[in-house]
Image (cartoon, grey):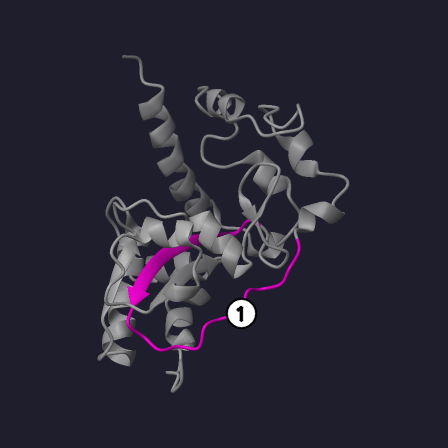
Amino acid sequence: MTGFQPFPGAAFDRCGLNRQHVFDLADLPPAVAATLGDTAPFRQLILLGHAGKALWDCVKAAGAGGEHPIDDFTVRSIERCFAEHLPASRFRLVYPGDHPVGLQRLGTLAGWHHASPFMVGIDPEWGTWYAYRAVVLADTRFRPFPAVNRSSPCTSCPARPCITACPAQAMADGSFSLARCSVYRLQPDSACTATCQARLACPVGAAHRYDVDQLRHSYSISLQTLRQIHRPS
């Protein structure tokens, strides 16, 4: 591909979408491409995420409310960025949306994702304080991004404080037990109702840790899902 367009990274940064990666669709593994549905007439996939507290600060400053304030703000921000900086480019959001997308697989291809013992993705710079926010198909002509080349910080962490800090002992047997984690979170006096003690104990990227409101929002969503799954029939 020649005649590359400039990527509007600063515009996404200002919205708090400060993790960005561009893939050429033709270079994606077939199994990943198959999760995207009909990709015609698009050429590229743009993976957008947030790291640290910037996005939540933007959401609060915008007065975003509703059931899904982060998703709603993200969609509006992407639409605005395309309208202002890429008005001639067609695009379609695959995520947020109803179509299942392998976000962690895309994150691995971008070099963002390493699995932590408590199964939240971890990065040497940001720790676990980042998330995938959008997958966009576009007929853009950006220069594809090279994968970030960073190893997992867990390999050089012999203490593994996350394991001992987990009140559910969800990692006590050497692998993560979703069942133990879920049962403990659903207890009335759980210390992980609106947070994760293992995640808080991880020292990597601690300066980027979410504030209490952001943690409460994020974990309320997963807690609601758990309650629906475990609701008596």
Task: Give the x, y percent position of residue 196.
Answer: 53, 36
Q: Amino acid at mark 1?
A: Pro
Q: Which residue is mark 1?
A: 146
Q: Nearer the viewer, residue 233 or 32?
A: 32
| Occupied quadrant, residue 177 | top right
Residue at the (32%, 62%) spot, across then down: 136
Task: Give the x, y percent position of residue 116.
Answer: 60, 42
Q: Nearer the viewer, residue 59 or 202?
A: 202
Residue placed furthest toward the bottom = 3
Residue 69 falls within the magenta-colored stretch? no
Residue placed furthest toward the right = 158
Crowding near pointer 1: few (<14 within 10 Å), some, many (20+)? few
Does 215 sit left or right of 86 as displayed?
right
Check the picture and name the quadrant holding the N terminus: bottom left
Does 47 sit left or right of 66 as displayed?
right
Residue at the (44%, 55%) spot, across then down: 29
Res. 63 in view? no
Residue 138 falls within the magenta-colored stretch? yes
Magenta region, residue range: 128-151
Residue at the (76%, 39%) spot, across then down: 159
Res. 221 in view? yes
| Occupied quadrant, residue 157 | top right
* 52 is higher (above) or lower (below) than 18: above
Q: Secondary structure at mark 1?
A: loop
Does 95 sit left or right of 126 as displayed?
left
* 169 is higher (above) or lower (below) than 15: above
Does 177 sit left or right of 81 as displayed?
right
- SS assignment for the magenta stretch, majority: loop
Check the picture and name the quadrant holding the C terminus: top left
